[in-house]
Amino acid sequence: MSEKPIPNRSLEELFEFARTMELEAARRYTQLSDMMAQHNNSELTDLFKRMADIEWLHVYNVEKARRELDVMEGTPSSYPGFGLNAPEVPDFLSMHYLLRPYHALKLAMQHEERAAIFYTELADSTENDEVRAVALRFAEEEKNHVRELQQWLARYPEPEPGWDDDPDPPNELE
Amino acid sequence: MEMTIQNMQLAQCGSRSAEPYDSDSYLSGVKPIWCPGCGDYSVLTSLTNALAYLQLSPEQVALVSGIGCSSRIPAYTSVYGFHGVHGRALPVATGLKITRPDLTVLVAGGDGDGFSIGGNHFLHACRRNVDLTYIIMDNQVYGMTKGQASPTTAPDWQGSELTPHGTGVNPFQPLVIALASGANFIARCFSGEPANLAEILVQAIQHPGFSVVQILSPCVTFRPEQRQWKNSVRMAESGLDTDIRTAARRLMEDDGMTVGQILYKGKRPAYQPQSASRGDIHKLERGFVL
Ligand SMILES: Cc1ncc(C[n+]2csc(CCOP(=O)(O)OP(=O)(O)O)c2C)c(N)n1
Ligand code: SF4
């Protein structure tokens, strides 16, 4: 049950949503990095940390755009769980301790794509011209992130099937 | 607020009329050691988000747990925590809430902790209806002890060497039992729906009396097939039954995979002995005579 674009959001709500989504994504990638550190997957620890830093930059960019357009700040969290399922926020359940950079980048790309679709649908559904313009701007930024991730991903070939086989798993049954 | 790099970055993002607590305010510096993919990570996130929504100060909240992977959760939070004895989280929490009614007392643990060794306490906690919120991370297995069947495991699950042909016994129906025993708020959620879970947790905490929130929370290590729960759970269409017969029928007919709604909300007043008896152990004990 991910967030659905709700038509007729105000510009303040749109900015609040965008900021919360980037913030939750930054938090989630930080948690994923910590998770991988606990399980000695140093490649993914670093990669998720970089993703978290990038998401923090996006939080900054949303705030900058808000100031440029002189949009008022909204209420910090309008309902419980606000942003936790947002399109850009990866979920914990798709994690595995043996994940490779290929998987992590693919996952991040899927979430940026979801965010782009979300903003495009929102732009299509709104009757407010200002909201449409900002939603399209955000959609374009998300598409740029997808392109950047695609280039990054090109450095990593897809792991062979069996990448998750572990001859000595940490939790092996007796 | 601790000045972490993230907080500094956040501060640079503009002056916001921020509320005193955000979800990070409820996290301790201890990093979870749950397996990557474990559903309990999401439960922690939803819980801290719910507490931030309620703007409860961390010292106003206590989180009591038993033993198990899920029961590690207090260590990962900044609220008062008590990592107790296996199956005994509910009596500890009951005592705490009775003597410190000013605290918001939460209880957490697994299906093994709560329904196996702690099963009897579960029945009586529902009956007593002390103002607690009981969060059960149900993965239908004992995760911490490496994958034995629990009371909620299906009878034909053959994943453990202890029960190679399955347990062959009827799984425990925690929410049916909770309803029959007097719990005042009953809900089932899925850890893969963290926003919905946060919303239900807020309501469970706010509702007076004993609130039971069963969370289907995959154990990806000993029940890897539970990764598919995200495809098999169903978001309930409607909830909030105050009529106990409707709630009973709904729970009895359900296959256990309907999530995301309050399944029962009662109006029984929470049990709280008179303040005069607080601190007097003998008077308190008399209040508990069965
Ligand atoms: C008195 C006692 N008996 C048995 C144990 C061993 N033990 C530790 S955790 C556990 C079960 C944990 O299962 P569950 O509560 O479902 O939590 P999970 O690890 O799945 O989150 C058992 C039997 C114990 N610690 N203490
Ligand atoms: S063993 Fe299972 S319940 Fe325990 S941390 Fe791992 S996935 Fe979670």
Image (cartoon, coloured by chain):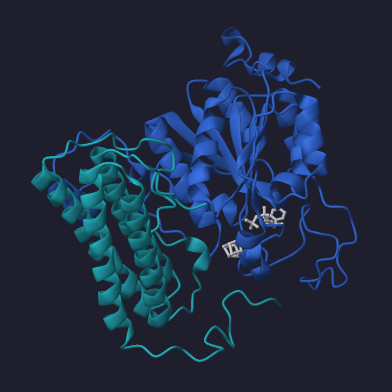
Specify whether residue B54 is in view. yes
Residue pictured at 38% horizontal, 37% vertical? B52
**As rendered, which of A71 and B24 lies closer to the eye?**
A71
- Say which residue appears at 68% left-offset and 13% top-offset: B283
Above or below A107: residue B28:
above
Q: Is residue B20 left or right of residue B117?
A: left
Using residue A61 as the reference point, say whether residue A94 is left or right of it.
right
Q: Position of residue A96 (x, y in %)?
A: 51, 73
Residue B163 located left or right of residue B24: right
- Relative to B20, say whether A19 is above or below: below
Q: Is residue B276 above or below residue B30?
A: above
User: Does the rendering let one see residue B4?
Assistant: no
Q: Residue, x 35% and y 72% (percent of image)?
A: A45
| Residue in the image at 20% along x and 49% along y | B10
**For residue B287, what is the image quadrant?**
top right
B257 displayed left or right of A88: right
Out of B55 and A94, give the one closest to the viewer: A94
Q: Which chain is blue?
A: B
Could you tell me which quadrant the C terminus of chain B lies in? Answer: top right
Give the colour in which the image draws chain A.
Answer: cyan
Ligand 1 quadrant assignment: bottom right
Percent x, y of residue B1? 24, 41
Expressed as whole percent of the image width and height from the top left, the position of residue A142 reads 28, 64
Q: Nearer the viewer, residue B148 or B15?
A: B15
